[in-house]
Amino acid sequence: MTFYEQFDDRLSAEDLGLIERARSFCRADFRTRAHEAYLRDQPFDVDIVRQWAELGMLALQVDRSVGGHGASYLCKVRVAQEMAEHSFAAAFALNNMQGMATRLCRDGTAEQQGRFLERMMSGSVIAALAMTEPQGGSDLRKLATHVNRVEGGWLLNGTKSWVTNGTIVNCLMVLAHTATSSGGSDIAGYLVECEDGKGLTRSEIRVPGAQSFRLAEITFKDYFIPATAQLYGPGEAIKTSLEAINAARVHVAAMCVASLRSALGSAAQYCGSRVAFGKDVLQHQGLRWELAQVATQLEAASALVFKAAAAVNDRRDARDLAARAKAFAIPVAVRGIEECIRVMGAVGASSKHRLSMLHSEVRMAAFADGTQEMLLDRIGRTLNEPSDAKPNANVAADTRQS
Ligand SMILES: Cc1cc2nc3c(=O)[nH]c(=O)nc-3n(C[C@H](O)[C@H](O)[C@H](O)COP(=O)(O)OP(=O)(O)OC[C@H]3O[C@@H](n4cnc5c(N)ncnc54)[C@H](O)[C@@H]3O)c2cc1C
């Protein structure tokens, strides 16, 4: 039985071919380049975006009719896992770009698709979601960014923070308050082409060891956006974002599983050849049991992630499963990688091995797409309901998102 067998058993030959393509790319020089960039405290080389696009990976879930691969959600998860075995942050960042192309293909107007879709698939337009603001991310409804109607469009004002790929994005889906026809205000979504200097400024958010997320804060001051930029009307934007979050939680959890699997492989290999007191250290029962614990938790996390991913893929209500998968997999991965570093002795923490990089990157998963408290809150709400995923038309729209 292979580690990803549950996934692979359900995939078409075409999906499996895409995963194989991703695997070959990631195991070649991508692995080394991502690690070398980490050691320089730099993000991965931006040329990797172009190469990833050339492999068709940014068009993974875009419809075939417009040049994409129409891949399944399970395929998308497996592709992200192939990269997360080598760099969690790069997998997160590239998956983010791919998710935006998918979103545009699904929800964009013909005008928006004509303007952006091909360029998103080729990597020349890098897009991201801009929801979080400096005053908070969990409570989306309190966001302060807003638009005001002007001739031909809107003026956008506000600051968005923690934008993935924010230092290089040239297109953002911005959540902002807008006036409603009833005289009130609600949150809408705008597809905003980013041109620095014309009322848009950005500043990098540096997180030690996590430069490959390319996080940034982006401020709009009377930034003009055309009338055609609205992607989601008032009331639709929050709903769509919350629907999309289940798929996002599951693939983040899946990437954590892949990073831990990779760390465990490295630790077991090293400990199998490092000799102390006359035998390799893996033969010492105390150490072997520690890695056995990590392996057991890894297997459990993977099983839960698969269950949640299958629910998303099959368009069943995955809200509870997605929260459980992320709430379980993230701490398992963070602590598991830490254990792997520790059992290797001091060398585990050195630049010679990639484990410190994986650890620095994976710990960031605790914040994106729902903090631990938000996830537990979600799980707690359904404790007295049947736990099986149910068909749900609202959530069906979510299955190819993010
Ligand atoms: C790597 C990375 C990538 C990201 N990418 C993006 C992106 O592309 N676009 C984007 O918009 N955002 C992005 N984010 C931001 C992310 O979505 C937010 O960090 C997240 O929503 C949490 O918001 P916050 O950090 O402002 O914490 P806050 O919302 O301020 O929360 C602070 C603390 O309070 C806790 N808390 C809040 N409410 C409750 C409650 N009701 N009960 C108990 N505890 C509570 C939280 O769990 C947290 O521990 C990214 C973040 C990271 C780390």
Image (spheres, grey):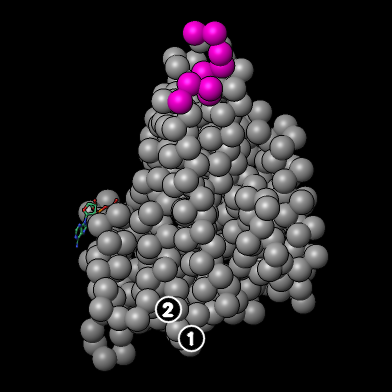
* The magenta stretch spans residue 279: yes
How many numbered discs sit on the rendered protein?
2
Q: How crowded is mark 2: few (under 14 residues within 10 Å), some or many (20 or more)?
A: few
Ligand 1: give its quadrant: bottom left
State the extent of the magenta-drawn residues as a range: 277-285
The reply to whether the residue tagged 2 has its Cβ within 8 angstroms of ligand 1 is no
Q: Is 121 positioned to the left or the right of 129 in the image?
A: right
* 171 magenta-colored: no
Q: Can residue 180 be seen by looking at this rendering?
A: yes
Q: Residue farthest to the top?
A: 277
Q: Dot 1: what SS?
A: loop
The residue depicted at 42 percent of the width and 60 percent of the height is 325
Q: Nearer the viewer, residue 181 or 117?
A: 117
Amino acid bearing label 2: Asp
From the viewer's perspective, is 29 left or right of 358? right
Residue 7 vs 264, above or below: the answer is below
Q: Relative to the observer, which residue lies in front, 291 or 238?
A: 291
Front-lying residue, 38 or 110: 38
Q: Where is residue 255 in the image (x, y as percent from the top left)?
A: 53, 50
Q: Position of residue 89 (x, y in %)?
A: 51, 42
Q: In this view, does 354 lie above or below 245?
A: above
Q: Name the residue under label 2.
A: 388
Q: Which amino acid is tagged 1? A: Pro
Q: Which residue is drawn at 56% across and 29% down?
A: 268
Whether residue 368 is visible, yes or no, is no
> Which residue bears the numbered disc 1?
391
Residue 133 x, y percent position in the rendering = 30, 55
